[in-house]
Image (tube, grey):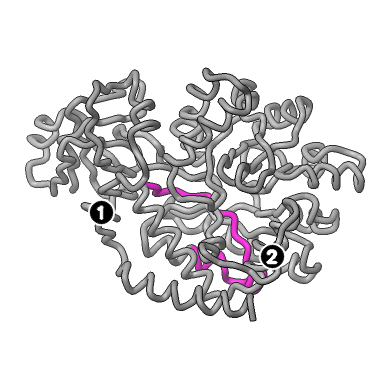
């Protein structure tokens, strides 16, 4: 039994949104009690007690679009790489990296990413993986790391024709096999989707194969209109817009997740909304790749379930919160934009997206919810309560202010010490494999 208390507690539960001196009790994988610290400690006197020391207790973060395979890109300079646009960035950097990845490097990438997630208070991720250097068993390798570190993970492999039909077939098979494996897992910690790169690298033949191979009760995770080139390709080849093509192939629906959606129009938004399809916004990536600003505020206004992700750019969800807030204010020339929409995406919609794949309530501190809890070293100089806590998170916190992370009832990090793996040994292995990857890429 575990009790976490003596902190300002943000619950994200409208019935009891905030406790000035809050406490949460955990048994096995679930929350069994929330309340005032004195009350909860007296009810569970023999439980292990984690003292928040006046910091903030809140639900752990959820990232609805990650890219584990990008972990070894930091600091990499690729010979001859001088991108002139988004397609050059994809082929010259990201596809160059994923074509060279070995299975061991995939494992190390997952290890590095998930350690960083734990340090930043993220306990649930939706990852979109690519390693055309080693496709088969790649999702299973990532899942093994997720199990070891206690991170909840919905995984998929990026189907694409860019390296030929045989590899596209391998990618479809990897998705299908992993989905069936995750559906039988029973821990509520693993899920699978049919991953797809983007429509401009996927032929009708591969679309048909993916549809025929996808197990029931799951959806697709696909990049949509991230660059204008994607839209131009669809119009030229098929005489229709991207979301129309996805609709024709049965990809839209309540279990499907569309990343980016920058170059979509009102008609496409209506299709997304009517089919209950999910969208995830990735502000840093969109800005860093100079792709443009999506109509995210309009999507949220229309009632599209729109979440917040990082696209592998960072593993700090508070950073994405800050950047999204600024991006849409700047883009719309409206200082009032994004105040309500972005925190709704991060704290409400990410949980709603995750709960289309995981059973236990996520993103909330209440009885019966998953015990995914963080303690943040933050003691503000100004008053804080349920009416202004989002402003405190936006302007006062960073991911590395997280001192303790609990995932599914297990202490993953305490007092900034990761408990579930030998970090020094794991990082030494990552550095060794990164050097091999860099050598392979640059010759």
- At 19% from the left and 47% from the top, the residue drawn is 2
Which quarter of the rendered picture does the C terminus lie within? bottom right
Q: Give the x, y percent position of residue 414.
A: 23, 53
Give the CA separation, mark 2 to mark 1: 38 Å
Q: Which residue is mark 1?
A: 416
Above or below, 137 against 320 in this view is below
Whether residue 256 can be seen here: no
- Residue drawn at x 25%, y 58% is 417
Tell me the crowding category of disc 2: few under 14, some 14 to 19, or many 20 or more residues within 10 angstroms, Cα based.
few
Residue 207: where, in percent of width, then height? 79, 53
| Residue 269 lies in the magenta stretch | no
| Image position of 20 (left or right of 387) | left
Residue at 63% x, 74% y is 100
Residue under numbered circle 2: 81
Q: Position of residue 232 (x, y in %)?
A: 85, 43
Question: From where the camera sits, is residue 196 visible?
Answer: yes
Q: Is residue 76 above or below residue 192?
A: below
The dot on residue 116 is none
| Magenta residues (range) | 121-142
The secondary structure type at the circle numbered 1 is loop
Reading the chain from its start, which is encountered first: label 2 or label 1?
Answer: 2
Where 372 falls versus 111 (above or below)?
A: above
Q: Circle 2 — which element?
A: loop
């Amino acid at each position: 039994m575990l009790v976490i208390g003596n902190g300002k507690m943000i619950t994200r539960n409208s019935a009891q949104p905030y406790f000035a001196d809050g406490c949460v009790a955990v048994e096995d994988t679930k929350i069994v009690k929330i309340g005032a610290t004195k009350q909860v400690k007296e009810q569970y006197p023999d439980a292990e007690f984690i003292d928040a020391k006046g910091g903030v207790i809140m639900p752990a973060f959820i990232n609805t679009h990650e890219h584990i395979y990008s972990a070894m890109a930091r600091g990499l300079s690729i010979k001859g790489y001088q991108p002139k646009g988004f397609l050059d960035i994809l082929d010259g950097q990201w596809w160059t990296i994923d074509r060279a990845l070995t299975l061991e490097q995939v494992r190390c990438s997952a290890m590095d990413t998930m350690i960083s997630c734990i340090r930043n208070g993220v306990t649930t991720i939706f990852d979109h993986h690519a390693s055309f250097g080693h496709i088969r068993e790649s999702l299973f390798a990532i899942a093994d790391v997720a199990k070891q570190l206690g991170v909840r993970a919905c995984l998929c492999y990026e189907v694409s024709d860019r390296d030929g039909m045989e590899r596209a077939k391998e990618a479809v098979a990897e998705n299908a096999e992993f989905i069936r494996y995750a559906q039988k897992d029973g821990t509520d910690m693993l899920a699978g989707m049919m991953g797809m790169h983007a429509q401009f690298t996927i032929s009708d033949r591969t679309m048909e194969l993916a549809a025929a191979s996808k197990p029931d009760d799951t959806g697709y995770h696909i990049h949509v209109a991230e660059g204008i080139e994607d839209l131009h390709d669809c119009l030229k080849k098929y005489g229709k817009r991207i979301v129309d093509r996805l609709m024709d192939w049965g990809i839209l629906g309540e279990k499907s997740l569309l990343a980016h959606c920058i170059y979509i129009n009102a008609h496409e938004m209506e299709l997304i909304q009517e089919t209950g399809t999910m969208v995830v916004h990735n502000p840093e990536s969109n800005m860093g790749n100079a792709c443009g600003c999506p109509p995210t505020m309009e999507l949220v206004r229309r009632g599209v379930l729109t979440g917040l992700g990082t696209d592998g750019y960072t593993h700090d969800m508070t950073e994405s919160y800050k950047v999204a807030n600024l991006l849409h204010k700047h883009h719309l020339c409206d200082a009032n934009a994004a105040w309500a929409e972005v925190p709704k995406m991060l704290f409400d919609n990410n949980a709603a997206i995750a709960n289309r794949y995981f059973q236990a309530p996520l993103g909330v501190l209440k009885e019966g919810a998953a015990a995914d809890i963080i303690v943040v070293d933050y003691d503000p100089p100004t008053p804080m309560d349920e009416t202004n806590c989002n402003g405190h998170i936006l302007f006062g916190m960073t991911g590395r202010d997280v001192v303790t992370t609990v995932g599914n009832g297990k202490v993953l990090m305490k007092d900034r010490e990761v408990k579930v793996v030998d970090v020094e040994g794991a990082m030494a292995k990552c550095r060794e494999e990164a050097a091999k990857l860099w050598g392979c890429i640059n010759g």
